[in-house]
């Protein structure tokens, strides 16, 4: 087993129902990852240690999901030079998800966080794979195959839809 290249973190175990989609796509693409709970508000020392040690552990990208105030992605991005992908999560205390989206999206200059759509952890996993694929030809080829399979699915659905025409 090789070392994880992607870290998937979330503010609470309740975010797992969303964040597992990132793990699933990384598994499908053959990319090793680690996944854990790191709360920016309840375990700030753990968050600090996780972010500061991520590159030394061999991670190349961090996917951080958070709901509500959603400080985790930005705080992690402030502590590491690795790319951070933020996943806004619509949580039980959320303002229809907008609080999470805006908290992750509106980062100050110098602390970028790539942000995907609300609950779009699958896209975060795909983006992490594309970042890794930029310097790993095997991952780049798996991404090309994955994208081709998406095209095939659309063409199959097109045929199915057009089959209902008269």
Image: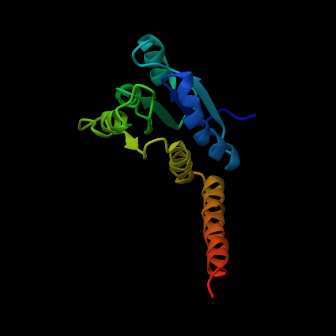
Q: Which quadrant would residue 88 be assigned to in this image?
A: top left
Q: Position of residue 40 (x, y in %)?
A: 41, 19
Percent x, y for residue 68? Answer: 38, 27
Q: Is residue 6 visible?
A: no
Q: Nearer the viewer, residue 117 or 23?
A: 117
Residue drawn at x 38%, y 25% as measured from the top left = 79
Q: Is residue 111 visible?
A: yes
Q: Give percent across and percent down for residue 70.
A: 38, 28
Judge by depth and name the residue closer to the eye, 107 or 50. Answer: 107
| In this picture, residue 85 sits left or right of residue 75 | right
- Among the 4 quarters of the image, the one containing residue 18: top right
- Which residue lies at the image location 40% right of the left edge and 31% below the top edge? 73
Most extreme residue toward the front is: 166
Task: Check the image and name the residue furthest to the bottom.
Answer: 166
Q: Nearer the viewer, residue 66 or 108?
A: 66
Residue sticking out furthest to the left: 109
* Rendered location of residue 16, percent (x, y): 58, 30
Vertical placement of residue 79 versus 154, above or below: above
Residue ID at (34%, 32%): 95
- 148 relative to 118, above or below: below
Q: In screen coordinates, is 74 left or right of 63?
A: left
Q: Relative to the observer, which residue lies in front, 60 or 64?
A: 64
Say whether residue 21 is left or right of residue 112. Answer: right
Image quarter hosting the C terminus = bottom right
At x 60% / y 28%, what residue is drawn? 35
């Amino acid at each position: 087993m090789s070392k994880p290249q992607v870290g998937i973190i979330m503010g609470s175990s309740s975010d797992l129902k969303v964040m597992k989609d990132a793990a699933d796509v990384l598994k499908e693409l053959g990319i090793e990852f680690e996944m854990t709970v790191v709360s920016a508000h309840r375990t700030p020392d753990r968050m600090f240690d996780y972010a500061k040690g991520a590159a030394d552990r061999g991670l190349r990208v961090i996917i951080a999901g958070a709901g509500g105030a959603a400080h985790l992605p930005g705080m992690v991005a402030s502590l590491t030079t690795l790319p951070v992908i933020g996943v806004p999560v619509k949580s039980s205390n959320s303002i229809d998800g907008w609080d999470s989206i805006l908290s992750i999206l509106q980062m100050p200059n110098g602390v970028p966080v790539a942000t995907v759509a609300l609950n779009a952890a699958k896209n975060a996993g795909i983006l992490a794979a594309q970042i890794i694929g930029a310097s790993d030809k095997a991952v780049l080829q798996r991404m090309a195959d994955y994208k081709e399979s998406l095209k095939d699915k659309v063409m199959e659905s097109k045929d199915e839809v057009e089959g209902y025409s008269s």
